[in-house]
Every structure is written in C-alpha cells, then in structure tokens.
Image: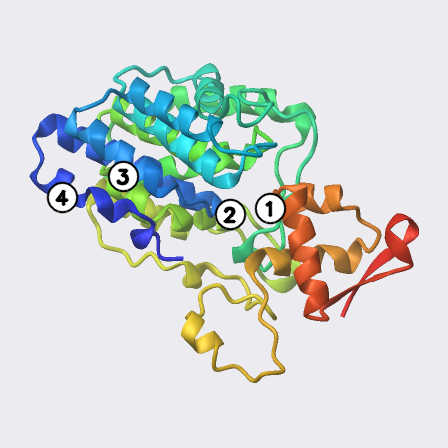
C-alpha cells in the first residue's frame, strides 16, 4: 500500500502555505486520515471536504463531528457501523485530540484515548480486553504476533509505564534516544490492550508523548507511512525461531529516525515481508495481475486470510471467521461466496453440520 496516496495529499497546500492555525489543523487532519491506513480504512470524500472547512476555520471540530454523525444517521438501512463510517468518525476524533494541548503520561490516558476514538463504534471502547486474541498479519504471511494474555494486561501496562517514567534521556545520544523510544512503543503495542484499534491508539499516544517531552514531531511521517508503522511494530514483536525469523526493531527504529532525527531512510513495506504469500500479493500492480494466465487465481488480502484460517479450522462458523480476520459477518459471507465461485473453497454436507474444504 502506498500511504502517500491515501488522501493525505489533500492537505499539503494548507501545510505548506497556510497561516499557523491552518497549518496546525492541516497537520492534524493529514495524520488523522493517514493513520486509518493501519487498518486498511479510507475516509469518505464527504469527510475530506468537511475537514477542509475546519482547516479554513469555517466550522469547529465539534461541528465537524456533528455533521459526520448526521451524515451517517441519514443513511438508509443502517444495521451496523461500516468501515468507512468508522474511518470518518475516528479521523475527526483523532484530529481533535492531536490539536489539544493537554496530556498525561499514564495508562489512564492511554485508555482514555481509545475510549474517545472508538466510543459508539466498539462496545469495548476504552476497556481492557478480557479475552485472548490473535490476528493474521499480511507482513507475516498470515501468522500472528503473540500478544499479552488477558489476565496480565493491566499489570503489564502499569509496569511498562512505570519503567518509562523512571527512565532518564539525559546524557544519551540521539540514536540511543530513538532506540529507547522504539523499544517502549513496541512493547506498549505488543500488549494489545484492546480488542481492536490498538495501533491507532498507540500512534496518537506516541505523538502526544513525544510532543510533551519536547520532541519536534512531524506528523506527515505518521500520515504517509501508517501501514509501514504497523508492519514495523509487527516485525519488532514476531519470532519464528524454527524458520530463523527473529523479532527485530530495525524497521521501527528507521521509522523513528526519520521522525525524530530527520533522516531519510527508505520505508518500504515489501522489505518487511517475512515470506512471499502463495496467493496473496497486495504489492503487485493491478495491471500486472491482469497479465496472469486465465487459469491463475488472485485472492484479495482478506480472502487469503480466510483460506489460511479454514485450512486448519474447517468447521469454523461465519462468526468465528469474522472474529479471526476482524471483519463483519456480512463481509465474510461475501468473501466465502467469492471463493466458492472461484472454486478455491467448497462447502460440504450443508450449512448446519458441514465443513469447509480449501482447494
């Protein structure tokens, strides 16, 4: 994914030429919208235009949020929050938080940011998860990072925050500073305190923390490389010793070196892949995909995750599949139907007592 084309360029003019207040709001919106890429979300054109009104000073951020709420309330046949609605609402809330001057370095603040971002979107907004999770990661070819167990999350959060609060940056080199920050942020993300929205919450908290500490944070790096940021966090916390794959902070450190030291390290997602995917290739140009043999079959990222999951979970329900790939059941039904049409997946022995067969 090229984060630079994920609508963040809509605000470049405000940032380059705008007066200080417009530039600040433009930076906040650029980052807020760019960060939706960590979960492959894209805000609507309506959100972009509404954000521009806020940057121009024509409407307040509260008015933006009210307009977005009314926009989706007016949509017909609304049974659940779709992903675009989530992207729009979270973007507005994120922009608001980034322009605020308040901050408190504590687990309470971390939980409060999650609650503010996802209230009304996730029923668990601001609440520490009480169940264990796994997530199929593109950069790991469908494997998952081992996250903190549900029964140890709060204690781990408290410990990590206490350790960081007692750490002194005085007298250490800029590179050592970057390495320490990368380590703290990586550890905070690996806890994965929430059922969903961890990377966006961690990114917002990190930006606020670094500003509070006196660092000059250029938000455009988060905006344009949000997907890389997530993948770098994954690689910093993934081990597969059997296949000689070890957790490495180097990619996250490159990100923070660009962010804090003004370096120009190349941030390419393809460089983080642990292994090539057999069917899924989201980095491939669509035009190149069209040159494939008529017999070859190209899956989307989500379809590939479903196939990998069903190889070892042949009796999984639509609900269980949805929980695993972090999508709605409606989306899963569409995916499984498409896979059956492509003859990559088969349902045997009916809906109630049947099983999935990956072909």
Label 4 neighbour load within 10 Å: few <14, some 14-19, many 20+: few
- Name the mark on residue 234: 2
Q: Quadrant of the N terminus?
A: bottom left
Of residue 307 and residue 251, the one placed in the foreground of this image is: 307
Q: Nearer the viewer, mark 3 or mark 2?
A: 3
Q: Mark 1 points at which residue?
A: 145
Query: How far separated are the C-alphas under marks 1 and 3?
Result: 29 Å
Query: How far separated are the C-alphas under marks 3 and 2?
Result: 24 Å
x, y (%) of residue 20? 10, 28
Viewer can see residue 215: no
x, y (%) of residue 47? 34, 36
- Secondary structure, mark 2, is helix
Q: Mark 3 points at which residue?
A: 30
- Secondary structure, mark 3, is helix
User: Mark 1 and mark 2 in contact (Cβ < 8 Å)?
Assistant: yes
Q: Quadrant of the C terminus?
A: bottom right
Label 2 neighbour load within 10 Å: few <14, some 14-19, many 20+: many
Q: Mark 4 points at which residue?
A: 13
Q: Earlier in the sequence, mark 2 or mark 1?
A: 1
């Amino acid at each position: 994914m090229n984060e630079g084309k994920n609508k963040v360029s809509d605000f470049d003019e405000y940032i380059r030429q705008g007066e200080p207040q417009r530039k600040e709001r433009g930076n906040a919106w650029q980052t807020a919208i760019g960060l939706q890429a960590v979960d492959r979300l894209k805000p609507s054109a309506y959100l972009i235009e509404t954000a521009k009104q806020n940057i121009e000073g024509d409407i307040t951020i509260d008015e933006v949020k009210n307009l977005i709420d009314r926009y989706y309330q007016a949509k017909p046949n609304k049974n659940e929050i779709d992903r675009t609605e989530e992207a729009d609402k979270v973007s507005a809330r994120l922009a608001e938080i980034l322009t605020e001057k308040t901050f408190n370095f504590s687990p309470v603040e971390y939980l409060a940011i999650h609650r503010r971002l996802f209230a009304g979107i996730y029923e668990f907004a601001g609440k520490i998860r009480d169940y264990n999770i796994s997530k199929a990661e593109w950069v790991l070819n469908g494997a998952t990072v081992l996250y903190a167990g549900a029964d140890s999350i709060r204690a781990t959060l408290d410990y990590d925050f206490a350790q960081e609060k007692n750490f002194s940056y005085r007298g250490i080199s800029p590179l050592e500073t970057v390495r320490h920050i990368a380590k703290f942020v990586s550890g905070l993300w690996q806890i994965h305190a929430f059922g969903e929205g961890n990377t966006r919450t961690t990114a917002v908290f990190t930006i606020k923390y670094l500003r509070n500490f006196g660092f000059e944070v250029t938000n455009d790096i988060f905006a344009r490389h949000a997907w890389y940021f997530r993948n770098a966090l994954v690689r910093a916390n993934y081990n597969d010793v059997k296949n000689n794959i070890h957790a490495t902070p180097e990619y996250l450190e490159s990100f923070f070196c660009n962010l804090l030291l003004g370096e120009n390290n190349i941030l390419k997602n393809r460089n983080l892949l642990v292994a090539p995917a057999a069917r899924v290739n989201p980095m491939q140009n669509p035009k190149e995909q069209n040159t494939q043999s008529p017999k070859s079959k190209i899956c989307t990222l989500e379809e590939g995750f479903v196939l990998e999951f069903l190889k070892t979970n042949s009796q999984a329900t639509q609900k269980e599949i949805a929980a695993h790939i972090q999508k709605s059941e409606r989306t899963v039904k569409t995916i499984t139907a498409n896979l059956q049409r492509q003859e990559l997946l088969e349902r045997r022995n009916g809906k109630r007592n049947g099983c999935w067969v990956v072909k």
